[in-house]
């Protein structure tokens, strides 16, 4: 798809942004780690937890996998974006976002589709940072927030994470892209499984064995969620044992300033005390108004997290990888 946005949001100056965090009398509004009812974003899509199908690929026609390799990281499999786009009319899509994005030739339609079908540049920046640092995720609980294709969460799963939850705004993205991608990568891992009793390679029929093994792996180690961030946070906090994540990945999610408060609330509500958020982003999103400078200013005003620059990319539009951790 072409790199286009379908927003009607004027660019904001720093002066305008300063006014946004003040009340009608010009006094500073204390956002901090407020609950979601205090944030300015209205719920637009209720959160849903998705149960993965036994074999999600069997419900997708004409799927073509591709392999993504970054440095020494394990290869990551995902559905080919071009083939996915060309076969969009064949796919189940209760939200009708596939037709809308094609008709409007847009990668983002605010409140309707938030770009999850495209792998954006900054995801690769974050993968490269993980490769450079040699980071593994053994024993970690991980959230891939605004996951899209789910590459960051899949990497964590392949590198030892005990639990990875995937969240995206659109249910179509989760069902038609994220879950199949996770299945592809779990299936790849199952190829090397030995029979537990004999120690020999498992000779069961591949399709049946892989589907059963992969389904169990998804249910045991993964969760899949769609909906807006306020609703997602409420859903997770209402669980009998509300999860806290050691790591939250999020890439290209600060393009719209209207979402900053709800994103910040998710970090506050779901990050473990000693956890870390890895955020990959462009310096500025032209035509939309968001970017790292404005988000950093928002974070600093709330005085909950400290933000640290980890990686800068100068090619093309300037991009960054930063971390957020709770202030001590």
Image (cartoon, helix red, strand yellow):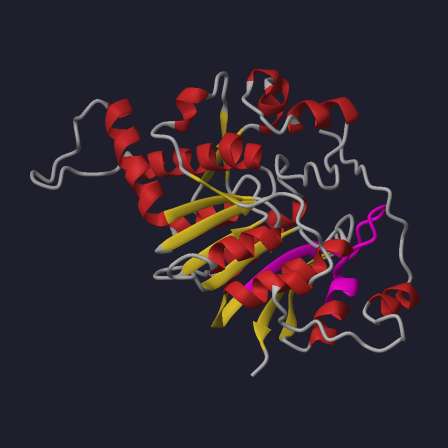
Q: Quadrant of the N terminus?
A: top right
In the depicted view, which residue is nearer to us: 183 or 70? 183
Residue 188 makes an appearance in the image: yes
- On the image, the x and y values in percent for residue 314 come to 75, 55
Q: In which quarter of the image is residue 106?
A: top right
Residue 321 makes an appearance in the image: no
Q: Quadrant of the C terminus?
A: bottom right
Q: Quadrant of residue 292?
A: bottom right
- On the image, the x and y values in percent for residue 72 come to 46, 50
Apparent side of residue 40 relative to residue 216 in the rendered image (left or right): right
Q: Which residues are the magenta region? A: 277-296
Q: Relative to 243, does residue 272 appear above or below in the rendering? A: below
Apparent side of residue 174 relative to residue 161 in the rendered image (left or right): right
Apparent side of residue 24 relative to residue 210 in the rendered image (left or right): right
- On the image, the x and y values in percent for residue 224 come to 46, 43
Q: Relative to 236, does residue 53 appear above or below in the rendering? A: above
* Image point (17%, 31%), residue name: 202
* Image point (43%, 61%), residue name: 243
The question of residue 288 being in magenta is answered with yes
């Amino acid at each position: 798809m072409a790199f286009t946005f379908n927003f009607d949001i004027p660019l904001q100056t720093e002066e305008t942004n300063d006014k946004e965090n003040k009340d009608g009398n010009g006094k500073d509004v204390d956002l901090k780690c407020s609950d979601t009812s205090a944030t300015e974003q209205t719920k637009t899509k209720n959160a849903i937890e998705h149960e993965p199908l036994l074999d999600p690929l069997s419900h997708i026609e004409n799927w073509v996998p591709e392999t993504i390799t970054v440095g020494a990281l394990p290869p990551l499999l995902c559905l080919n974006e071009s083939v996915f786009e060309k076969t969009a009319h064949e796919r189940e899509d209760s939200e009708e976002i596939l037709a809308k994005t094609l008709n409007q030739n847009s990668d983002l339609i605010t409140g309707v589709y938030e770009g999850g079908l495209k792998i954006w540049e900054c995801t690769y920046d974050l993968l490269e940072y993980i490769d450079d640092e040699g980071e593994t995720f053994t024993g970690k609980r991980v959230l891939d927030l605004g996951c899209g294709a789910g590459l960051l969460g899949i990497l964590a799963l392949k590198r030892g994470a005990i639990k990875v939850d995937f969240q995206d705004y659109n249910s179509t993205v989760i069902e038609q892209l994220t879950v199949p991608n996770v299945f592809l990568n779990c299936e790849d891992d199952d190829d090397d499984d030995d029979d537990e009793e004999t120690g020999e390679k498992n000779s069961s029929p591949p399709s049946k064995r892989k589907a059963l093994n992969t389904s169990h792996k998804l249910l045991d180690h993964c969760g899949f969620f769609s909906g807006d961030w306020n609703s997602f946070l409420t859903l997770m906090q209402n669980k009998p044992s509300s999860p806290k994540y050691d790591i939250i990945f999020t890439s290209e999610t600060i393009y719209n300033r209207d979402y900053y408060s709800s994103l910040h609330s998710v970090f506050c509500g779901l990050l473990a005390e000693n956890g870390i958020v890895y955020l990959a982003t462009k310096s500025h999103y032209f035509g939309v108004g968001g970017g790292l400078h404005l988000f950093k200013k928002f974070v600093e005003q709330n005085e909950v997290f400290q933000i640290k620059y980890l990686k800068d990319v100068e090619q093309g539009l300037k991009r960054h990888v930063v971390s957020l951790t709770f202030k001590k």
